[in-house]
Image (cartoon, grey):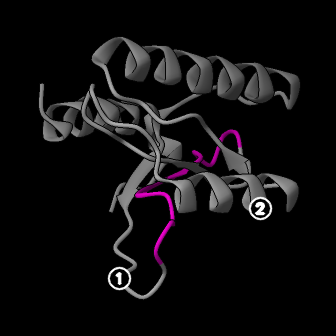
């Protein structure tokens, strides 16, 4: 399985109002390669995640950056290297967004979201 297949699956979050952005930071090694912006019906700080092919692991610098960002209050998810892991992440984020929207008296509607 290729990282591009995992990336395509993660993009399914866009069907629920999330924006999935690929970060390119050549001057900042160790930065997670995806940023997920939450939908307007459930605002949260951005979620950061690293996508890897199944046999890969985070580099030491990526682990250090991840730890530092978590200490600063960022939502940094464990890296995903399989479609099952991506599906589990999608499910967790969707459920959190839906619970938050319900507690705020909001309901998900694609009309509330602007897709770039």
Regarding mark 1 in the picture, which secondary structure is present there? Answer: loop
- Which residue shows up at 47% across the image and 23% down it? 90
Magenta part of the chain: 29-42
Regarding mark 2 in the picture, which secondary structure is present there? Answer: helix
Give residue 54's quadrant in the image: top left
Q: Nearer the viewer, residue 54 or 91?
A: 54
- Which residue shows up at 55% across the image and 55% down it? 60
Look at the picture and state if 100 lies above or below 65: above
Residue 34 image offset from top left, x and y in percent: 42, 54
Q: Which residue is mark 2?
A: 68
Please state, as top left, top right, bottom left or bottom right, where the N terminus lies in the image: top left
Look at the picture and state if 22 lies above or below 8: below
Please say whether residue 68 is one of the residues in the magenta stretch.
no
Q: Is residue 56 left or right of residue 48?
A: left
Which residue reaches farthest bottom?
Answer: 27
Look at the picture and state if 51 lies above or below 28: above
Label 1 or label 2, whichever comes before in sequence order? 1
The answer to whether marks 1 and 2 mark residues whose Cβ atoms lie closer than 8 Å is no
Query: What secondary structure do most residues of the magenta stretch adopt?
Result: loop
Q: Which residue is mark 1?
A: 26
């Amino acid at each position: 399985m290729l990282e591009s297949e995992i990336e395509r699956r993660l993009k399914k979050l866009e069907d629920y109002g999330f924006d999935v952005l690929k970060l390119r930071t050549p001057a900042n090694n160790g930065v997670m390669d995806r940023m997920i912006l939450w939908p307007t019906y459930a605002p949260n700080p951005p979620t950061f995640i690293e996508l890897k092919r199944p046999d890969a692991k985070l580099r030491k610098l990526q682990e250090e950056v991840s730890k530092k960002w978590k200490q600063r209050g960022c939502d940094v998810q464990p890296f995903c290297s399989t479609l099952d892991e991506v599906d589990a992440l999608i499910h967790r984020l969707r459920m959190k967004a839906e619970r938050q929207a319900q507690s705020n008296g909001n309901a998900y509607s694609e009309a509330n979201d602007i897709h770039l």
